Amino acid sequence: MWNNRQGLNVTVGLCGIAVMVMVATLCYCEDTFTGTQILKLIDKNYNAKTQVSVSEMVIKTERGPARTVESKSWSEGNDKTFTEYLAPAREKGTKMLKLGDELWIWSPSADRVIKIAGHMLRQSVMGSDLSYEDFMENTKLADAYDVVIATEQMVNARQCYILELTGKVDDLAYHKRKIWVDKERYVPLRSDLYAKSGKLLKTFKIADVFQVGDRWYPKKMVFKDALKRGDGTEFIIKSIEFDVEIPAHVFSKASLRR
């Protein structure tokens, strides 16, 4: 028979093993995400079967007052997007259609459809810090980039992973990225976007996020073209709906002239 001391030692030993297992389990849950898994969680927040949104761009330049451009967009997956500009009066009625790797624009003043391709994709949209190429990017981060978890840092009072991304496919607008990802909500609160040479091209910061269903999504973003002067462009989501039905005819060139 065991004496009381032996029984106590066994009990303490079992408790110690249980504590070690529990600590190991907690550590596994919190610290063993790979960089690719984090990118997939970001993609899960951002991507949907369909989405319809109304947004504003507040374009700040070094000359004159800021301009506000309002638009409504319909998207299906990552390959189809139709955008109609609602305000101001000068831009109202302008429409933009993206199908895969092709982009067309129609404006009431010109009354003709123009295909945007080649070097034109790098031009500014409505004088903003966003280019047509920014709107054309349609690849999920996890599919397009190799990733390394560099370290962690606080951004906007949120603990963030710092990820370093290197492109693994061709035709990316930004071959390298450094992103600060909220560890709880998996939204990039800051991104530095680089050319293949390592030159900084653009910065992107999220000032506010909101929850839509089970996903977190940027509410207010600030884009800054590193090659331009000015205070950047604010992009504000006024409303957004996910997984809603969109008629097929919306994503046709005929819709540009409607």
Image (cartoon, rainbow, N blue to C red):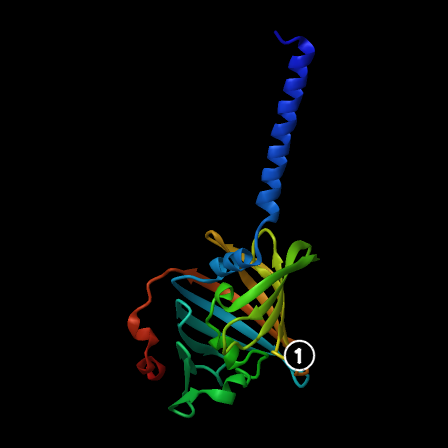
Report the front residue among 137 and 132: 137
Q: Is residue 11 above or below residue 80?
A: above
User: Hey, which quadrant is residue 35 in on the image?
Assistant: bottom right
Q: How many marks?
A: 1
Q: Residue furthest front?
A: 1
Q: Amino acid at mark 1?
A: Lys
Element type at mark 1? loop
Residue beneath the point at 40% across and 72% down: 79
Q: Residue at x 48, y 83 (%)?
A: 89
Q: Picture coordinates of residue 181 (x, y %)? A: 61, 59
The residue that appears at 49% across and 76% down in the rendered structure is 135
- Name the residue that disc number 1 marks: 199
Density class for disc 1 (Cα within 10 Å; few <14, some 14-19, many ≥20) is few
Q: Is residue 22 above or below residue 12?
A: below
Residue 125 in percent (x, y) is at: 53, 82
Above or below residue 109? Residue 71 is above
Out of 57 and 125, give the one closest to the viewer: 125
Q: Residue 117: percent from the left, percent from the top?
A: 45, 87
The C terminus: image quadrant: bottom left
On the image, which quarter does residue 47 sit in?
bottom left
- Coordinates of residue 33 in the picture (x, y in percent): 57, 51
Q: The N terminus lies in which quarter of the figure?
A: top right
The residue positioned 69% from the left and 12% from the top of the image is 5
Give the vertical position of 137 relative to 189 (above or below).
below
